Image (cartoon, helix red, strand yellow):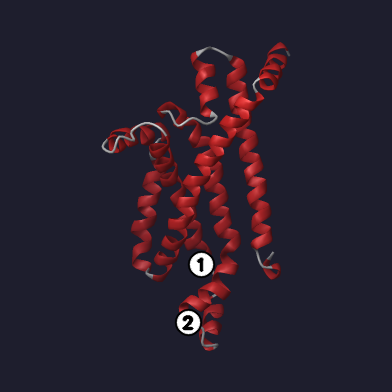
Amino acid sequence: METLEQTVAYIWHNLPFILGLTQRHLILVGIAVGLAVILGVPLGLLIVRFKALATPVLSVATFLLTIPSIALFGLMIPLFSLINQGIGVVPAITAAFLYSLLPIVRNTHTALTGIDPGLREAGKGMGLSFWQQLKWVELPLAVPVIFGGIRTAVILNISVMTIAAVIGAGGLGTLILQGISQSDVRQLITGALMVSVLAIFMDWLLLTLQRVLTPKGIR
């Protein structure tokens, strides 16, 4: 009980600092996942159109996800040191971006390959081009599954981005690292709690957005 009271008091007296770290954490995750969506969704479309690419692309994305996060962040340091960006935001965002690719590419591929072939034939029968059919028929049907991949990527990277504090990127991982190095349970609990709350909130927010963007007929 005493530890809980101390933690609440710590949060209250350091609220602006904690909110600043939370904002930075969310920005880092948002940039990484945003870039992954920009690349991952078109890549998913590409491997649906050219089926021979599906296995190698998904295999590479799976391999990237199997690399331990601390190792991947470590690998970014010598790579980006070549352009004097070995520590900080750039390697952190790059590593999180790579972690985001698999769920987004895989879910885009799964969503589009799972569409009833009869719908595609109907679209062709109506004279729709590939891109028209994609825009008006396939993507609206694929929205729930694609958003599922985006939600997975966001939740995954909210957790992974805590490790980015090790390479000086900041965010909520700063509290956890300081809590460990200073043997301060208050900071450790606060960091872990904020990461959990942020993950739950973003999952709810994206689920709400998914429902809004999903056509009424398939909700």
What residue occupies the far left of the structure in this picture? 82
| Nearer to me, 88 or 182 | 88
User: Residue 171 versus residue 1: which sits nearer the camera?
Assistant: 171
Mark 2: which secondary structure?
A: loop
Residue 3, horizontal then vertical, whole percent: 68, 13
Q: Residue at x 60, y 25 (%)?
A: 17
**Label 2 Cα neighbours within 10 Å, binned few <14 / some 14-19 / many ≥20:** few
Report if the CB atoms under discs 1 and 2 are less than 8 Å apart. no
What label sits on residue 16 in the rendered view? none
Q: Determine whether the residue tagged by mark 1 lies in a helix, strand or loop.
A: helix
- Disc on the earlier residue, 1 or 2: 1
Q: Nearer the viewer, mark 1 or mark 2?
A: 2
Q: Which mark is residue 129?
A: 2
Which quadrant is home to the C terminus? bottom right
Residue 88, percent from left and from top: 41, 32
Q: In the picture, which quadrant includes the N terminus?
A: top right
Q: Residue at x 59, y 68 (%)?
A: 141
Q: Which residue is mark 1?
A: 112
At 55% across and 23% down in the image, what residue appears?
A: 175
Image position of 122 with respect to 7: above or below: below
Q: Residue 67, relative to residue 5: is it above or below?
A: below
Which of the 4 image quarters holds residue 79? Answer: top left
For badge 1, the amino acid type reads Leu
Query: What's the residue type where badge 2 is placed?
Result: Ser
Judge the density around disc 1: few (<14), some (14-19), many (≥20) Cα neighbours within 10 Å: many
* Residue at x-position 41% and y-position 71%: 49
Q: Position of residue 12 (x, y in %)?
A: 70, 21
